[in-house]
Image (spheres, rainbow, N blue to C red):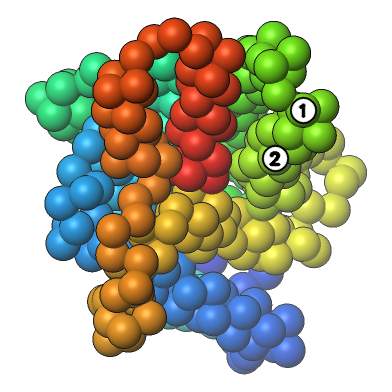
Amino acid sequence: MVCHDNETVSFFYNLSKKSISDTWRPKDVVVVSLGLLVCAFVIFANILVMLAIFINRRFHYPIYYLLGNLAAADLFSGISYLYLMFHTGPWTSKLSIHEWFVRQGLIDTSLTASVINLMAIALERHQTIFTMQLHSKMTNHRVVLLIVGIWLIAIVLGLVPSMGWSCVCNLQQCSNMAPLYSRSYLVFWAVLNLLTFTVMVAVYTRIFIYVRRKSHRMSQHTSQAKHKETVVNLMKTVVMILGCFVVCWTPGLVLLLLDSSCESCDVLTYEKFFLVMAECNSFMNPIIYSYRDKDMRDTFKRILCFPCLGSQQKGEHSGVRFNTLEQEARRAREGDGDQANGGQVVLKDAENMLDSTES
């Protein structure tokens, strides 16, 4: 087996028929401009989320640590993509093989960490809602171990191509989209992300069915309009979470699979735009998972120097934490005689757990 470690990046690009232009083409300018704009949004939004979780002690719970880790992964994704934007186009030919692997490895690591975080959040919400807890029973120690595990998996997957799973020693396996990557690795990475999405679909579907059934049981004690509103709101949340993932990730993952299985398919025309779409998921995550939390919005306002806007709502807290605690305290004082009322509160708590912190 002959390895081509001493060849230039241009050698592999020419082999895969992916040309490196000597000048900036209009398409390159559009992609880089769009990419820099996305990076700015990603970096700003996720720094804001991390600051909010850090400075507000109300967010010092396992689910918010996971949201903070998701923001860290998306922030890393934005920085990695920013690095890519300054090492793409005509600049690609100036990279050594090692520098090229660093460029791609940063992207792979950050996106993998983001996707695994999404699955971890889904599983945490599933466990919390099904046991009707105010907070996850997961200890801080376990959360730290989970976060470390997420990053270890992401780093390993990002390093695997540079450690040997590439086409440097097997030119016939070279990908068209990523000319130094082995097609088998790209298939593996795409299938892994699709499996992660499948787990998320299964988890959120089970949550939706469970809360809908609970809502139906409680509907005999409340109005049909309220029952319908609960189901519709929950459906909106689930569709938003899964729909955003599908829109942002599916085009790129399908393109990776086509690159490995269809030699006649033109996968290079839209590959850069599809990568931008995958990156867009990193600034949609703060909106879906954090901005809709009222406490988080109030903290954002304080960070952005608008304290007066949130001062009137200082005593209000998101449903997963203090509203629920206050409801439980009131229920304890009033007694447990009214089962219908209690059932409605439990149902509302479950809806809040999904809608307030996860979406």
Residue 86, x across and y down, in percent: 43, 79
Residue sitting nearer the eye, 208 or 212:
212
Q: Is residue 68 above or below residue 307?
A: above
Q: Nearer the viewer, mark 1 or mark 2?
A: 1
Q: Which residue is mark 1?
A: 223
Q: Residue furthest right?
A: 264
Q: Is residue 143 above or below residue 41?
A: above
Circle 2 SS class: helix
Question: As drawn, is 254 to the left or to the right of 95?
Answer: right
Q: Which residue is mark 2?
A: 233
> In the rendered image, which quarter is residue 331 located in?
top left
Q: Residue at x 54, y 30 (%)?
A: 348
Residue 66, x across and y down, in percent: 31, 39
Residue 110 in view: no
Circle 1 SS class: loop
Q: Residue at x 23, y 20 (%)?
A: 138
Residue sitting nearer the eye, 244 or 62:
62
Q: Residue at x 51, y 80 (%)?
A: 36
Q: Residue furthest left?
A: 141
Residue 38, x across and y down, in percent: 54, 73
Image quarter of the C terminus: top right
Residue 76, x across and y down, in percent: 33, 58
Q: Is residue 96 above or below residue 94?
A: above
Q: Are marks 1 and 2 in contact (CB under 8 Å)?
A: no
User: Across the whole image, how many numbered discs are drawn on residues?
Assistant: 2
Q: Residue at x 29, y 49 (%)?
A: 68
Residue sitting nearer the eye, 323 or 112:
323
Q: What type is the residue that disc 1 sits on?
A: Ser
Q: Earlier in the sequence, mark 1 or mark 2?
A: 1
Q: What type is the residue that disc 2 sits on?
A: Asn
